[in-house]
Image (cartoon, grey):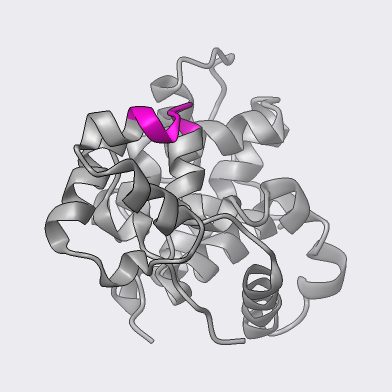
Amino acid sequence: MIHAYSELYINTAQNILGHAIDYAIRTLDVDIKTFQDAFLVSPISKQFSKGNPKYVSGINGCELAEMVLDYANIAYFEHEHIMYLDKTNYYWLGWALAYYQWYTNLSFMEIINNISFEEILLMYPKYHEMDIMKFVSAINKRINNKNKETNLKIIRQTFNYSQTQLAIYSNVPIRQIQLFEQKQRNINKTSGITLYKLANALHCNIEDLLEKDLAS
């Protein structure tokens, strides 16, 4: 399996995302879903998922959290940067999520579309003392077994585009879009130009539209 970025960064990346979520929720008193959504829509999550050194090793978790909130225009009280020595369930959430994203090379959007921050948090009592690969296997199984929509449909609906609107914006025939979303045509095997047109219209990366089958 090809991981998202160099293994040299994974420990610091886990630590940073763990502290970011912990700091946002415990210290800045931001609602967990609010921070989740802000993180997903920010370019920071995409850069983090690619292993940009600025985000996976060059800043601390408190700075990352504040950058996410600033991008989303979410108000918070300025506070001293505190990274607690006790590793809470919120820290574990970010720590485990960062590892899973690195290991599978899925985008954070793909992951959270299948299992939310709150749902991962519910896994803490069972998995936080286990080998991290037990957590990876559990999430893989959930994603593979879930009757999920295609990435194309999920991202299209995120922008509140109808299939007709996407066809107009992308100049891709609506029937082709329908076949992709109904899984009657494999989007992974379509032409590069079609993928480019769809990704451009949806303001996402081509990789975000591809479907992945995960090893359990």
The mark tally for this picture is 0
Q: Nearer the viewer, residue 86 or 212?
A: 212
Q: Locate residue 58 relative to residue 100 in the image: left or right.
A: left
User: Quick check: is 203 in the magenta stretch?
Assistant: no
Q: Locate residue 83 relative to residue 189 in the image: left or right.
A: right
Where is residue 113 drawn, in percent x and y?
Answer: 59, 50
Q: Residue at x 65, y 82 (%)?
A: 137
Q: Read off the magenta span.
A: 158-165
Q: Quadrant of residue 204?
A: top left
Q: Locate residue 50 relative to residue 60 in the image: left or right.
A: left
Where is residue 130 drawn, in percent x and y?
Answer: 75, 82
Q: Residue at x 51, y 45 (%)?
A: 154
Q: Is residue 207 above or below residue 103?
A: above
User: Quick check: is 159 in the magenta stretch?
Assistant: yes
Q: Can you say which quadrant of the picture contains the C terminus?
A: bottom right
Q: Residue at x 62, y 59 (%)?
A: 148
Q: Can you say which quadrant of the picture contains the N terminus?
A: bottom left
Q: Residue furthest front?
A: 175
